[in-house]
Amino acid sequence: MSPDVDLTVPLPGRHALRDWLLSLDSRLFEAAAERKWPAAQPVLPRLSRSANHGVLWFATAAAVAASRTPRARRAAARGIASLSLASFAINTVGKRTVRRHRPALDPVPLSRQLKRQPITTSFPSGHAASAAAFATGVALESPAWGAVVAPIAVSVAASRVYTGVHFPSDVVAGAALGACAAFAVRGMVPTRGRIVPPARARAEVPALPDGEGLVMVVNAASGTSDRADALTDFLPGAEVVVCEPADLHVELEKAAARARVLGVCGGDGSVNAGAAVALRHGLPLAVLPGGTLNHFAYDLGVEGPRDLSKAVKQGDAVRVDVGRFRSGATRGIFLNTLSLGVYPELVREREHWAPRIGGWSAGVLAALRVLRADRHPLEAEVNGRTRPLWLLFAGNGTYHRMGIASGRRVDLADGRLDIRIVHGGRRPALRLLAAAVAGPFIRSPAHAAAQVHRLRLSGLTSGTLLAFDGEVTDVEGDLTLEEQPEALTVYRPLTESLITRQSIS
């Protein structure tokens, strides 16, 4: 293995300030080498080695995500994304810009030295950059988990000076670059806390201080009945009904007959079923996320029992739009998205494999199988013209593009259907990828986008698959999509800034 840059390049000429700083850096390094570090010997060298190639941080991310809370999973993902950006910047620019030798190991006790010494340039420290990037990324999403990770990150950074492989300034510069990388990631993909939903008129709903009058129906298949149990810790008067998926609709109807507030805990499909029953009975809906993605609940700002119980106790609720579709005798609603083409086939394939290999693995396998299959695009008549389509996406509300990511709504009552179409042609995978990279509102031969209140398609062949909120059904002939403004009342925690703006308006 050889160094990544040529360390034999002559050093630049003398410069008084630079020479003084380098001399100070060397003195600090020697002072650290001479100092006795209590209890550091059995810990810091091992910690330094474990951080090689990001192994420590990937293991930490897995441990954080294993807590199964939405915020923890997002914090772990943000930490890894920040680490990846920092590592890319350090290895492609940082170490190739400042060609600094590693410190001489003479002052460092042999017991501290690493068995395998790094051979890349010294400035800046990649380990410190990765540690700072991961810890800062985690903290930006979840301050609590950030406080847990921060001591580990500081120890890794300190270990690089302790073991003699970096000067102090290498570590400081690396940590600064790592933190900047985390903030850059937040600039591209904002944390949920930074995206404040627009002010909306508060809906009049009953405040239930102890939860009496709330009947929460839980889909047992979601595997998160413990969340409903946690809800009763906050709302002891609430009634919880756990049922199998086949009984969900029946139990929701029974609950609606005796409830002041209808609750549902499960994935987006379960929430869709609960919303349909709440609309028929004119009841407000309380949503407790219990699925894999939980788009609707998270866009409401409900991440768990604490958020929901706060809204129910205080009587905080808003009215949101509902998307409706009909095709012959088939009718339904969608709170998140509806789609035709490749995606419904992917959903059906994923549901087939999920019980065997798990949801996330099934999603990856389904995407590979669907996109590699030899198939023809869907044909539908739009505005009197027959078009080949790989995908038609209809969002209940506008899905905004956040930096390089898309898929977040900041307004659930803007009265619009967000329509995006990926045109037919060869190689669906390339067209779908091109549409995703180009963005929804950029002109492209691969896709088009529009925001409408109503859309009608004709000429759908028998057996055409339609996906809505994670569920799949068959349609044929004509398909009509409509947006029903502010049709559903849902509980949601309101931030102080949002309440203040509403009172002023």
Image (cartoon, rainbow, N blue to C red):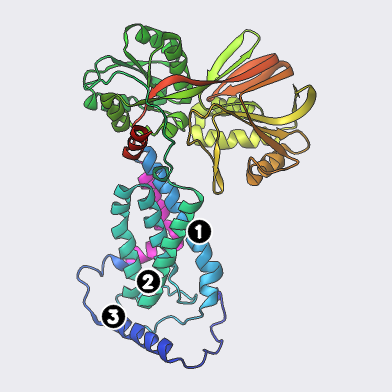
Q: Position of residue 96 (x, y in %)?
A: 55, 75
**Can you say whether 398 is above or below 169 in the image?**
above
Q: Which contiguous range is marked in magenta?
A: 46-66
Q: Position of residue 470 (x, y in %)?
A: 53, 25
**Can you say whether 323 is above or below 100 in the image?**
above
10 Å neighbourhood of mark 1: few (<14), some, or many (≥20)?
Answer: many
- Amino acid type of disc 1? Leu
**Distance from the alpha carbon under mark 1 to that under mark 3:** 31 Å
Which badge, 2 or 3, is on the more N-terminal residue?
3
- Amino acid type of disc 3? Ala
Residue at which label 1 appears? 85
Which badge, 2 or 1, is on the more N-terminal residue?
1
The residue drawn where x is 40% and y is 53% is: 137
- Amino acid type of disc 2? Val
Relative depth, front residue between 439 and 2: 439
Residue at which label 3 appears? 33
Q: Position of residue 113 (x, y in %)?
A: 34, 76
Is residue 81 shown to the viewer in this render? no
10 Å neighbourhood of mark 2: few (<14), some, or many (≥20)?
Answer: some
Relative depth, front residue between 50 and 441: 441
**Distance from the alpha carbon under mark 2 to that under mark 1:** 18 Å
